[in-house]
Amino acid sequence: MSPAKNDHVDVALVGAGVISTTLSVMLRELQPDWTQLIIERQDIPASESSDPWNNAGTGHSALCELNYTPEVNGKIDTTKAVNINEKFQVSRQFWSYLVENGTLGDPSEWINATPHMSFGHGEKQSAYIKARYEALKDNPLFPDMHLTTDPEEFTAKVPLMGKGRDFSEQVALSWIDAGTDINYGALTRQYLDAVTAQGVEVRYGSQVTNVTREGSGWKLTVKNLHNGDTTTVHAKFVFIGAGGMALPLLQKAGIPEIKGFAGFPVSGQWLRCTNQELVDQHAAKVYGQAAVGAPPMSVPHLDTRVIDGKKGLLFGPYAGWTPKFLKQGSNLDLFKSLRPGNIPSYLGVAVKELGLTKYLVTEVLKNQAARVESLREYMPDARDEDWELVTAGQRVQVIKPAKAPTFGTLEFGTALINSADGSIAGLMGASPGASIAPSAMLEVLQACFSDRIDAWTPKLKDMIPSFGGKLSEDLALYNQQWDRSQKSLKLA
Ligand SMILES: Cc1cc2nc3c(=O)[nH]c(=O)nc-3n(C[C@H](O)[C@H](O)[C@H](O)COP(=O)(O)OP(=O)(O)OC[C@H]3O[C@@H](n4cnc5c(N)ncnc54)[C@H](O)[C@@H]3O)c2cc1C
């Protein structure tokens, strides 16, 4: 066997999904002299959550997702929505910079303009959609927001949802045309093409099986999954972008910051439309409200996709359950992640999240007829034969430790964990991870390379002009960057 090229590197990144590759590109821009190695257990990149059919491809910026605008004491709280939107503006600026400097290729291979819509039916949901519209419509981060309650306009906007509907029940639909559909798999591959052309090695078919301290850096044990050989990689800085496996690998590293954290796997399924005539009649991502007691990740949506230049249509997600931490993982993943330190976290969630348990049991018992019945809430004329079931990516929801008597709490976002000395970090959790990866990786840089941030700031401002500030507080810069990204990303 020929010796591995990069056994001693400045930076080792575990996983070739959208998160590690975002950091890889960022670090190449900031510190091109650092050696980097990406280690991936599969033979191809982005075959787990970042694969386009394994996630919904929504460019999450809170334009339509109702879980980011909860009603609190009769008022719509827009704090989370503005926060997610700000983070997505970071992504737009970063991608524009990379397209403009030729690092990324044709953006239409991975990002496409797709209206984002929010849907409510019945008196209560419709009143909420209207209140949300009123709360957001004058905020520049939510440009040109519209609302209709008129059946004719509703049917003209979303024909599949209007046809066959009994409009004696109220409906409300709000929309912003400037939403996006993103193929995170294609974006990952463009990132990889760029960094490998600049000397970054990607080692496929190679699984990191252990992570141990070595002086001020780390030693990774890597198993070649084709011939069983084991090698070691020595790195000054390690990033664990291993999706659902980030938790077990951070546990192996033994850093105190991961103590008490646990992971709750939830698998997803979509109904994918097989009838191209129907696919062509829908052009939007339409998000509704989660069923009572159901978690935010279960919010149903009828979603246009653009994958490899072809339009698709999906509805879901439906939840399933397996103890695996990756779609192509092992049934032992959950059990192997149990530690004396995180058992109270699991117990806390088991007691507090009875609604989640009930939701999962109901979902797992759904057959095709029951799934299409749920779809009919959105598309009244849906027929079983036009839809096939596909398995989506595996989510591992983060359970954060908390002190007794509350024990653990289930989180529905993403969580960054890093060691106090900044030599290792990892990202756990699911949505909105891919959409806000550039902003999450800026957090990694700030947490792990605080001694370099000052020197990197001019370049960071070049890459992300709003770096260090907020676009919501600088309208002129927001307008300038919005117009720039609409043009550079071919969204206008
Ligand atoms: C059903 C669903 C819907 C979603 N919808 C959206 C959405 O609409 N918008 C959005 O922004 N986000 C969405 N997300 C979240 C998004 O998909 C993730 O945030 C993102 O893909 C995570 O990227 P990643 O690189 O961290 O993980 P992954 O893409 O899972 O990549 C991790 C990689 O690490 C590799 N790996 C794991 N363990 C090891 C090891 N020990 N050694 C070597 N390699 C290893 C894996 O093989 C994999 O390739 C969704 C997720 C799911 C599951």
Image (tube, rainbow, N blue to C red):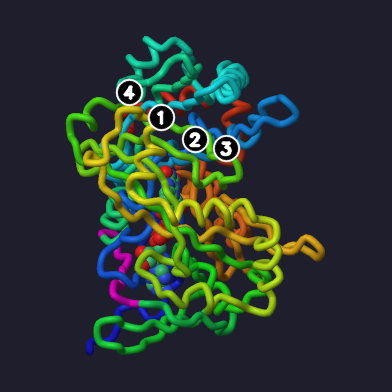
Element carrying mark 1: loop
- Which residue lies at the image location 60% right of the left edge and 63% below the top edge? 417
Asked whether, in this view, residue 357 is left or right of residue 271, the answer is right
Element carrying mark 4: loop
Determine the CA span between mark 3 and mark 1: 17 Å
Amino acid marked by disc 4: Ala
Report the mark closest to the observer, 2 or 4. 2
Report the mark closest to the observer, 3 or 4. 3
Residue position marked by numbered label 3 in the rendering = 67
Residue position marked by numbered label 2 in the rendering = 61
Mark 3 and mark 2 in contact? Answer it, CB < 8 Å.
Answer: no
Closer to the camera in the image, 177 or 221: 177
Mark 2 and mark 1 in contact? Answer it, CB < 8 Å.
Answer: yes
Amino acid marked by disc 2: Ser
Q: Which residues are magenta?
A: 197-206
Is 200 within the magenta? Answer: yes
Q: Residues within 10 Å of mark 4 (few under 14, many from 20)?
A: few
